Image (cartoon, grey):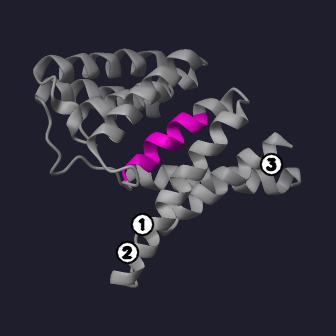
Amino acid sequence: MNQKSRRMLSALAIAYFAVTAEGCSFAGEPWPNEQWGKYFYSGRDSFTKGHFSEAEKQFSLALKESQRVDPYFPSTQHGSQTESLAWLANACLKQGKFEQAESFCKQALKIGESASKPDNFDLIDRLTNLAEVYRSQRKYSNAEPLLRRALAICEKNFDEDLSKSNNWTGTPILAAGLINLAVVLQEQN
């Protein structure tokens, strides 16, 4: 893959994540309390401004708050603990704190796996987040199986959903999964 193709794939992946992140909502999701929301959204605001150290601090506070208020909250896949962990991992990754990012990603994945079936669509984010930590460290042999698993989950859900209707909203997720895997495979060579 030439440099131009690589840049195009990166741009597509970034555009996809920007669009999906912008569309994220916790509507209907249980929050442990208002304080968690303040910490969490302050962290997201800092993150989007590139203030990753401050974002890390806010997401850490959000995680502690969700654990304090309801230690059983992680049973919800998109619960406050898994979201706090995922964003905390991203803030650490942006600062080059790979061990911490990996630990937070693994915690979020463990919660997600214990709260759902092994092929639950919601695990895709957890798997790809951990794969990105490994890819950032050039640990491609660790990243590849996670991306393949995420892609398999996406394809399974894609097939099941298409049998019910012709309008599946996961098409961009499937495309992003293919792009992520292609990038890892290319970078290995």
Q: Is residue 88 magenta?
A: no
Q: Is residue 129 magenta?
A: yes
Q: Amino acid at mark 1?
A: Asn
Q: Which residue carries the number 1 mark?
A: 157
Question: Quadrant location of residue 110?
Answer: top left
Q: Earlier in the sequence, mark 2 or mark 3?
A: 2
Q: Which mark is residue 161?
A: 2
Q: Is residue 13 left or right of residue 40?
A: right
SS assignment at label 2: helix
SS assignment at label 3: helix
Residue 155 percent across, percent down from the top left: 51, 66
User: Which image quarter holds the N terminus?
Assistant: bottom right
Give the spatial CA distance, label 2 vs label 1.
6 Å
Question: Are the residues tagged 2 and 1 within 8 Å (C-beta)?
Answer: yes
- Magenta stretch: helix, strand or loop mostly: helix
Give the spatial CA distance, label 3 vs label 1.
26 Å
Query: Is residue 121 depicted above or below 132 in this figure?
Result: below
User: Which image quarter holds the C terminus?
Assistant: top right
* Residue under the image location 49 percent in, 50 percent down: 18
Q: Is residue 146 left or right of residue 66?
A: right
Q: Residues within 10 Å of mark 2 (few under 14, many from 20)?
A: some
- Region in magenta: 122-132
Tell us which disc is closer to us: 3 or 1. Answer: 1
* Residue under the image location 33 percent in, 17 percent down: 60
Q: Which residue carries the number 3 mark?
A: 186
